[in-house]
Every structure is written in structure tokens, then in C-alpha cells.
Amino acid sequence: MSLISANPDRQMAEIVEKVRQGERLTFEDGVYLYRSEDLLTIGQLANEANMRKNGKKVYFTETMSLYFTNVCESHCAFCSFRRDEGQEGAYTLTPEEMFAYVDEHITPTAREFHIVGGHNPNVPFDYYVESIRSLKERYPQVTIKAYTAAEIDFFSRISGLTYREVLERLTAVGLESLTGGGAEILSDQYRDKMRVEKAGIKQYLEVHRTAHQMGMRTPTTMLYGPVETIEERVQHLIQLRELQDETNGFQVFIPLSMQPTSPKAGIRRRNSAFDDLKAIAIGRLMLDNFQHVKAYFINIGTQLTQVALTMGASDAHGTIVRERISHSAGALTPAGITREDLVWLIKGAGRIPVERDTHYNEVNVYS
């Protein structure tokens, strides 16, 4: 039984036909979908698009989030994680201090370290290189996915190296993939408004282009909330789609629901569930050249993640252990989740849980 309305308006009917015929949606189509209140049609259409690409499989990995430093030269308006050097709560860990944390929390089946942090100008680029080298030498079985495009741009500035040279130094000591953060919204107006004091649009895209040209495959994100316009969101998606046309290097698109600045913030300070599901579904429909769209339970919660698996999402992220960035900004969701709970969550949506590695190779299918 189809949930799509029997009498959708003309533009929605045209979009439905485009998606079913495999035609690319336009900027105007994306704006229309964001303005539409017909979430059921949008969600089912995204589900159809996802089923053609991935069937009922939903992917996750056993990952561990690590943060070597929260000291940052940037003062982006949306970030509650960063600290100034010497400020209460500021830290910069040595490899030995990170080992102590990892040894206490790592599981025998952990497959990935997910590493991000502040742009700390008080340590040299070699600090960031040695952090990766030390982890890889101590935990050789764990894949290292580290640093955002904005961090790579920062490393380039403090070292005087090109993006490629920075990436070559890092891959030589064990880096296998970048993280997707730092995109925020790819709009100059937004970045001015939110004081995004780090890599701009051109730099973000160029870092990923360079990584892709080197054979690396990477995730990418969109941090959405009440600040940007619908048009800016859609243009963000189109810029990612255009780079994917060029390189085919993006593995997954991750919509990140912006968190308020305090855990005590009421629902009016948070994105609605309606908006969260739209971001996932419209991302799936606009990004026709991406294999996966992720539902990030850290920002939208486990139950909404389960619903999102029927509206275009094919990735449920991973176990994490302890997430800090979104929770420092007021996220009310679990900071981590077990493999067993992820399998239960995915099966509850009528999907097939698939444990993967960083590169989306299938490790275990829970049929």
C-alpha cells in the first residue's frame, strides 16, 4: 500500500516521477520539498530511492570517538566544545594520556577511532602527526578516521605545507579517512553570521577533493538549524553533489541537527522532528550520486533514528562509547550505544543490520 497521496499537487507529482525515472532533482525541486508539508510523500519517495541503492540493509560500525584537545583558536558561535588555552576545562592530551583513556574504554571488537578536536595553535603540526602515529602503533588493528577538512586547512596554515603534503604526512603514519565535519552550511552569508572562523567553502571542498584524488574516501556533513535559509541548505547539497560528480569520493552524507547551547533548553530551541526527518529524506533525494545517508542518533535520538531508516537513511552510525561535542552543546541523547542495542534498533525498523568497517566492507550481517 502506498502512502503517497492520491492527488499530490502538480510539482510534487513531477518530483515523484523524476525520482522514479532516475532523473536528477533541481535546486527548485529541493526548495519545494523543504517548503512542503507532505512529509509522508517525501519520506516514502526517499525510502524508494534508498531501497534501490541499498535494499533493506542498514550499516553501522563499532567506533570510538577520541578528542586529543579542546583548545581552539576559532570562536564559532555554535560551538560549546572549544576552550582557550589556560581556561578552566581546557586540555591537550599526550599520547600516553590518550592510551589510558582508550585502554579503559575500548572493546575487543572496536574497529575504528573517530578523532576530531580543536585547532590548537599552541602545539606544532608534528603533535597531530605523532598522535596518529602513536595510536596506530599501539592499536594496529583499529582503523583511524581523523580530522575534519577544517583541521587539515589549519594544519596547512601552521606547517606551511600544502593540503596534499599534510595528508601524505598523516596517511604515512596510519590515517585512512577524514571525518566529515567542518562543512556547517556552505554559504558565505551563514558563515559570516555564525562567525565560522575556520576553513571557508572553497577550502572545505578542496581538502576533500585532494583526499579523493589521493584515493581516500570520506564522509561529509551539513549542520542545519534555525539560522540558515532553505535555499542555503539546498545549495549546500548541490555543491556536495557537484564534487561527488567530479571525484566519487564521498561515502556518506551526514545531516547534523544543530544543538542548543544548554541541556536545559526547551523544545522551541531545538530542531523539530519534522525538520530532522526532512533533512535526511531530502538529502537522500538530492544526493543521487551518494551511496549512503546517515541518521546520527547522537543529535536526533534513537527512536527518531529508527523512523529515519524508513525515510532514506541507510546508516545508523556506530557505538561511539562517549561523544562530547554535541553533548557539550546540549544534546539530550545517549553519548554512546551498544552493538546489541543498535542491532535491535535496526531490526525494529524492519531492516537488516550490517556491521561494517570504515570503508563500508561488510563484516557481519544480522539476518
Image: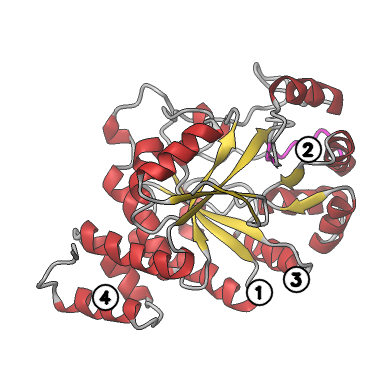
How packed mark 3 is, by other alpha carbons closer than 10 Å (few <14, some 14-19, many 20 or more), is some
Question: How far is disc 2 from disc 4 in space, using C-alphas?
Answer: 50 Å
* Pair 2/1: label in front: 1
Q: The disc labelled 1 sits on which kind of residue?
A: Thr
The residue at which mark 3 appears reads as 213
Labelled disc at residue 16: 4
Residue appearing at x 69%, y 68% in the figure:
209
Label 3–label 2 contact, CB within 8 A: no
Q: Which residue is mark 2?
A: 121
Q: Which range is magenta?
A: 112-124
The type of residue carrying mark 3 is: Gln
The location of residue 145, given as percent across then percent down, is 71, 47
Considering every residue shown, the one lying at the far left of the view is 7
Colour convention of the picture: secondary structure
Q: Earlier in the sequence, mark 4 or mark 1?
A: 4
- Density class for disc 1 (Cα within 10 Å; few <14, some 14-19, many ≥20) is some
